Structure formats: C-alpha cells, structure tokens
Amino acid sequence: MPRPDRSTKPTDARAAKVAQIQKASRSAERTRGALIWGVAALVVAAIVGSVAFVIIRESPATADLSAVTVSENTGGDHRTTPIDYDSAVPAGGPHHPAWWNCGVYSEPVRTEHAVHSLEHGAVWLSYRPDLPADQVALLEELGDEDYMLVSPVEDQESPVIATAWDHQLSLDSAEEKTLKAFIREYKQGPQTPEPGAACTGGTDVSLVAGS
C-alpha cells in the first residue's frame, strides 16, 4: 500500500511563513517611507517658512512710511519764468511747461523742470553733493528705471530726499529700506496729477527764461 504524501504540509507552512515575512517587510518599508517623506515635508516647510519670513521682514512694502510729509499742490500751473520755491526740493507747485527728462544726473537739474516731472508721476531722488560715493551709487542704481530722476541739490538739508508729487521723505542714508518703499508707493502713485504722462521727450537743459 502506498504511503500518504506528507510533504505538502511543511511546504505550505514554509510558504505561509515567507508570505508573512514579506508582508511584514513591505509594511516596514511603507512605514519607513512615510517617516522619510514626513520628515522631508517638515524640513521643506521650515525652510519655506524661514525664507518667507525673511522676505516679508525685508520687503520694502513693510517699511514704515509715517515720516513722509504730505503737502497739497495743484497741478497744471505752468510758468516760463524763474520760480521762488519754499524749499530747495519742492514736492509740487507751479513749474515750467517742459518736464525734465527722467534719468540719472551728476549735476543739479533745474527745479522748475523737475517739479513738472513729479506731476507726471516721477520720483526725484536728490542728494547733497557731499554724499559718499557708495551712497550716490545706490541712488543711481535705484534711478535706473522709468519715472526716476536722480541728481544732486546744493542746498538741501538732509543727505538724501525722496520726492513725489505732494509727498516727501528725508533720509540720512541711501541704504534705508524706507527709500525703496517710498518709490514703490508713490512712483506713478494715486497722488499723481497726470499719471502715465511721459517722462522722456522733455528737456535736459534749462528753458527757464533768464536762466
């Protein structure tokens, strides 16, 4: 009489054991993968959060502009004769019919023309002639944009003055972040009497009568 085949039971047991081990291994791999991705996500989130914090903290938009002085001037008052302004750098008022071409100038510009540029939405960065060269370079870099005017002004009181129509900010340094905030806020800003009017095609020589 043939003997019964008993080899299937050990084989089935071994197969079950292997399957159990493989299942446990796959589960462990999934757990490790989830942990790795979780840690990676936390690291990325921390980095992104830190970068965002630095950007927000250093953004010109967050700078305090409470030191900006505000005046009230009416646009469109054109005169061809010399004008006696109340300050070396006026933030508006009567002006020559020709605006000064925006750009960077190493010599003083005629105020009557520069004020007209403000009426068109320009920001005028003026500085004392004794401002250190590295500070002047910073202003010139900021002035390398549309609707920016940079020039020295002989008699201004502060080392640096940022001026838009009806708005002005006096500064001790060209490095202050409020300077960029001022430009962002007021260049072609809502205070502009003639937004979008040209800041080129005007003049870069004085046309004031008797000058």
Image (cartoon, helix red, strand yellow):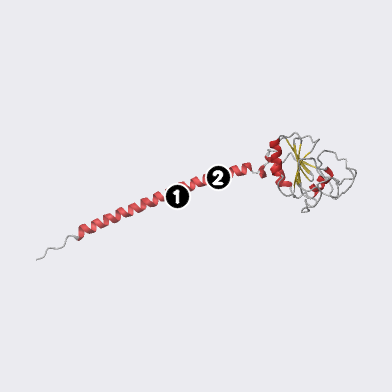
Of all residues, the one furthest to the left in this rendering is: 1
Of all residues, the one furthest to the bottom in this rendering is: 1
Query: Which kind of residue does numbered mark 1 sit on?
Result: Trp
Among the 4 quarters of the image, the one containing residue 123: top right
Quadrant location, the N terminus: bottom left
At horizontal 71% and vertical 38% (from top left) the residue drawn is 136
Whichever of labels 1 and 2 marks the residue nearer the N terminus, that label is 1
Among the 4 quarters of the image, the one containing residue 19: bottom left
Q: Position of residue 45 (x, y in %)?
A: 52, 47
Q: Is 117 located above or below residue 6 in the figure?
A: above
Question: Residues under labels 1 and 2: Cα distance?
Answer: 18 Å
Q: Residues within 10 Å of mark 2 (few under 14, many from 20)?
A: few
Q: Residues within 10 Å of mark 1 (few under 14, many from 20)?
A: few
Q: Are marks 1 and 2 in contact (CB under 8 Å)?
A: no
Q: Is 3 located above or below residue 110 in the figure?
A: below
User: Does residue 187 appear left or right of residue 92 in this picture?
Assistant: left
Residue 64 in sight from this viewpoint: no
- Element carrying mark 2: helix
Q: Position of residue 115 (x, y in %)?
A: 82, 45
According to the picture, the residue beneath numbered tag 2 turns out to be 49
Q: Which mark is residue 133?
A: none
At horizontal 69% and vertical 43% (from top left) the residue drawn is 141
User: Does residue 79 appear left or right of residue 18 in this picture?
Assistant: right
- Element carrying mark 1: helix
Q: Which mark is residue 37?
A: 1
User: Does residue 158 appear left or right of residue 210 in this picture?
Assistant: left
- Along the viewing direction, whichever of 199 and 22 lies nearer the viewer: 199
Quadrant location, the C terminus: top right
At horizontal 48% and vertical 48% (from top left) the residue drawn is 41
- Along the viewing direction, whichever of 192 and 129 lies nearer the viewer: 129
Q: Position of residue 173 (x, y in %)?
A: 70, 36
